[in-house]
Image (cartoon, rainbow, N blue to C red):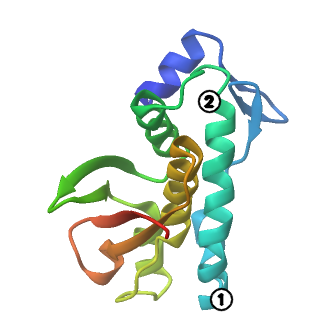
């Protein structure tokens, strides 16, 4: 079981019922990853959808983290992992903020669906953009610079402030 799921169950902030799945009082959904690879247009729209998801994640966490800071960022990345989008970690390289995602299920599914050789994780990029924009109260964009679906070992995203 995911470590965050164990903690949330322990403190009664995660409920799994016959009709719904709730985390920290909000209904969340689980869907087949394959459903987002219908065509290239849908992949482009996934980025905007992801931004909305990222904002909702931060709205959810504001009850528990009154100050928007690095702790909230870390917890939000744990939620992204719990929601099934892979384990993410932040690192800096040459004055750039990068996010690395190991074993992105989106990239894995893209290869299965014939999207090999293309970047496939626009939804995850959008989620990170929504998270960063909501926490730091500036407009951030996130671009996938390397994708496992292209044959790279990991998916890597670059975070930058939009001017």
Q: Is residue 94 left or right of residue 100?
A: left
Q: Which residue is mark 2?
A: 61
Asked if marks 2 and 1 touch (Cβ < 8 Å), the reply is: no
Secondary element type, mark 1:
helix
- The numbered mark at residue 99 is none
**Percent from the top left, x then y, of residue 135?**
54, 41
Q: Position of residue 53 (x, y in %)?
A: 66, 53
Q: Check the image and name the residue furthest to the left.
A: 94
| 24 up-or-down from 156: above or below | above
The residue sitting at 55% across, 10% down in the picture is 10
Q: Which labelled disc corresponds to residue 41? A: 1
Q: Is residue 23 visible?
A: yes
> Could you classify mark 1 by the number of other residues whose Cα lies within 10 Å: few (under 14), some (14-19), or many (20 or more)?
few
Q: Residue at x 76, y 32 (%)?
A: 26
**Is 97 on the left or on the right of 110, as rendered?**
left
Q: State the residue at coordinates (56%, 45%).
A: 83
Q: Could you tell which of marks 2 and 1 lies nearer the N-terminus?
A: 1
Q: Is residue 31 at all visible to an observer of this figure? A: no
User: Is 138 left, or right, of 160 in this rendering?
Assistant: right
Along the line of sight, the residue nearer the viewer: 69 or 37: 69
**Picture coordinates of residue 68 (x, y %)?**
53, 31
Instruction: Give the CA distance from mark 2 to mark 1.
Output: 31 Å
Outermost residue, top side: 11
**Is residue 26 depicted above or below 63 in this figure?**
below
Q: Position of residue 70 (x, y in %)?
A: 40, 33
Quadrant placement of the N terminus: top left
Q: Horizontal placement of 106 versus 11: left or right? A: left
- Position of residue 71 relative to residue 36, above or below, is above
């Amino acid at each position: 079981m995911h470590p965050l799921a164990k903690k949330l169950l322990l403190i009664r902030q995660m409920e799994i019922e016959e009709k719904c799945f709730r985390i920290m009082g909000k209904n969340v959904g689980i869907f087949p990853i394959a459903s987002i690879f219908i065509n290239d247009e849908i992949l482009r729209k996934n980025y905007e959808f992801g931004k909305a998801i990222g904002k909702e994640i931060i709205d959810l966490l504001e009850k528990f983290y009154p100050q928007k800071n690095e702790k909230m960022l870390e917890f939000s990345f744990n939620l992204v992992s719990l929601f099934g989008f892979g384990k993410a970690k932040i690192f800096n390289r040459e004055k750039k903020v990068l996010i690395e995602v190991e074993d992105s299920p989106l990239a894995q599914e893209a290869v299965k669906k014939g999207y090999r050789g293309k970047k496939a994780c626009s939804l995850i990029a959008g989620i990170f953009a929504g998270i960063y924009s909501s926490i730091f109260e500036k407009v951030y964009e996130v671009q996938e610079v390397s994708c496992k679906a292209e044959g790279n070992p990991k998916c890597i995203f670059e975070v930058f402030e939009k001017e």
